[in-house]
Image (cartoon, coloured by chain):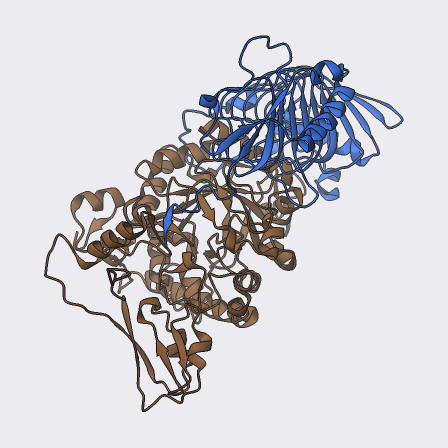
Amino acid sequence: MNGREQSSPTPDSAAVRKVPTGPARRGPTGIEPARLTAGQPGTLRGATSRQGARVAIDARGIYYKTLNEQIREEIERGAREIVLNNVLGQRYIGTGLAFRGVTVIVNGVPGNDLAAFMNGPTLVVNDNAQDGVANTMNSGLVVINGNAGDVLGYGMRGGSVYVRGDVGYRVGIHMKAFGDSHPLIVIGGSARDFLGEYMAGGELVVLGLGQNEQAVVGSYVGTGMHAGVMYIRGEVAAHQLGKEVRLQAPAPEDELRIRQIIEDYCRVMGIDENEVLARPFVKVYPYTSRPYGRLYAY
Amino acid sequence: MAYTTFLPPEFRVVIDKEACLQCGRCVQQCGWSVYTWDEAERRPRPDHSKCSACHRCVTFCPGSAITVKHNELAFKRSDSMSPDLIKAVWKQAETGGVLLTGMGNDKPYLRIFDHLLLDACQVTNPSIDPLREPMEMRTFLGRKPDSLEVSTSGSSLRGTSVSPAASARLLTELDRQLQLETPIMFGGMSYGSVSLNVHRALAMAAAELGTFMNTGEGGLHADLEPYQDHIIVQCASGRFGVDTSYLQAGAAVEIKIGQGAKPGIGGHLPGEKIDYQVSITRMIPQGTDALSPAPHHDIYSIEDLRQLIYALKEATGYKPVSVKIAAVHNVAAIASGVVRAGADIVYLDGFRGGTGASPTIIRDHVGLPIEIAVATVDQRLRDEGIRNRASIVAAGGIRSSADVVKAIALGADACAIGTVALVALGCHVCQKCHTGCCSWGICTQRPELTRRLDPEWGASQVVNLVRAWTHEIAEVLGALGVNAIESLRGSRERLRGLGLDQTVLDVLGVKAAGS
């Protein structure tokens, strides 16, 4: 929107001429489903209240694109803590957000792809989260004070994700570490199948808190894994593992690292760390960094 | 047993002793170490079994003393068990491995482009001379609106010099477009599979030509940042080198679902090719294998694809998003879903498209020709009334300007070239890309080889090629009596099939020659 357009008089409807360019026939899905949830495209903006660097936005019925524009605008205006109230399914909150020293607090259930490609901020969800949290995230911290859905941390390269409850399928696929970036996912509850598939770096920790006798992880744990490590609190049976990983008791240096991870997680989550550390962990690790090195005839 | 392999050498390196200057340049030039220097006789000795027929030695031999010939051993003639099949069996019996290859499908499937003929004007409709009259080659890729809202309010009055058109104002907010000065762009080839100098050459060429190069899935090296307005960045299943600054650097983002040379399978860049520079560009440790999963594990449906498309739009301030899919049997229905998912560009990659490495069985037996894919996708999107929502890029088997013209007439908005751009840089299509020994410095990371390719020279080679093709396309447009590439798009009436059966003609929507 440039200045010239803004200063022009608004044309009345009689002066607006519709010129069809596309074919007259419409496809069967003229209305796109995503537009029906969590607000409609348009100019409706969330009511905002500001207090210094703290800003609250009422997200009720606000279209995701507008809401995310508002978040970016507020950060550019100097906001350092943004509270989103009445969030209901808005997608892409924190997606592509590349600011350090910013905290976004989500009150309500955010939609898919929360914190995708995020680089720097802290994002706290005070409810459950859906699928695709921290997709290809680069740095920052995501805290989910509930359960999260499938495909959490896909291709995640750095930063941390703390989940208080359970997560779904395909979590931590193809996480990778490079240079100073080491992605970390800590899951308070349990994880379903395909955990850490193709994992190429970083750390995945599953605590199984409140799981009692149930399985902490599903099947195909670490299939195709070729770097990084998983620490799982509780028992993992051989049949649950992918064929590229091995299981062993944590070495002393692993124990040190586990303690460090748990201390950080428990401090943020307000959990007694001694209770968590009271139960032993197992370590899942890849037995080779070249799982498919001998597959080909050159 | 005295033998080490049943496999006979594929080629024979013949050195004319009279012409040989005994300079040893062939020894130095060969990336495959075919030659050793015989100190006693002061001449090179070839190991035929290592030769790939890349002709590096032939080109650089100052005495023109070297020729490379087929090693034409006689096998008992058989239409069933050809020598190539027998050799493949031996290779696998000896290694137990999956056969690998590079470049595109080399099997003798029907080449549809070569059975399509273009029309020209005679008598009844004058042709146009592109040397004297303007010929519009500019192409915009991206979503076009279903309708335009135009305001004509304002000062336009009958009798004044202000025309209604001058006072009209476009109210529809247009989606961002990629502006191409010629309908030819470069296909995705990752840094890691090709050398950084190839990326540099293509980026420079794209900037000079006013078109786009594509990073492939290996990230964007810092040296390419000056050309970022002419670069499409790729986001593939391995997410190598993908972060916010990478996404924001590109003029557009491409989600790579599949590749014509290897539809449905992932990629595997061996650790040997991950040197320091590749490592920092891909953002993975040196020497580790770069495994690209076969699918994006966050995309199992059209709805999931839509989710990633809009995540990328959110992360880039709504830049155009291209989705690259391989031409497979249901490509028209898939492309329809891709367009409905919100893609601005559908990039179709035919089964003759090249690759840095693919299992031979996939390269040679999976997919569809690009001609079929473009024709069926264009028709499907028109039938469904959504053709305006996305542009179609045809790639994977575009070998000449004639192929570009025919692909556009079949329904493409633009074409992408990969293999032929590399041929302009010296590639001899020896199909050994997967070995990493490319003597031409193209498909290798060995510093003594990659430095052979001067990026500025390379850029001028590619610019020359694309400019020449653009002139040729303008000639064809003039002969067809149209003055814009847009007028050719989907103009199948200007094509006729010669030697194609009726089923293929029906699929292409093209009439038989003479009808």
As drawn, the chain in brown is B
Q: Is residue B401 left or right of residue B341?
A: left
Q: In this view, does A127 lie to the left or right of B269?
A: right
Residue lying at the far front of the rendered structure: B1
As drawn, the chain in blue is A
At which x and y percent is residue A230? Answer: 59, 29
Is residue A213 shown above or below B394?
Answer: above
- Identify the residue at image location x=61%, y=54%: B229
Image quarter hosting the N terminus of chain A: top right
Image quarter hosting the C terminus of chain A: bottom left
Is residue B270 shown above or below A95?
Answer: below
Is residue B325 shown above or below A63?
Answer: below
Image quarter for residue B277? bottom right
Which residue occupies the foreground of this view, B177 or A157? A157
Q: Is residue A94 visible?
A: no
Q: Is residue B68 left or right of residue B235?
A: left
Which residue occupies the foreground of this view, B2 or A184? B2
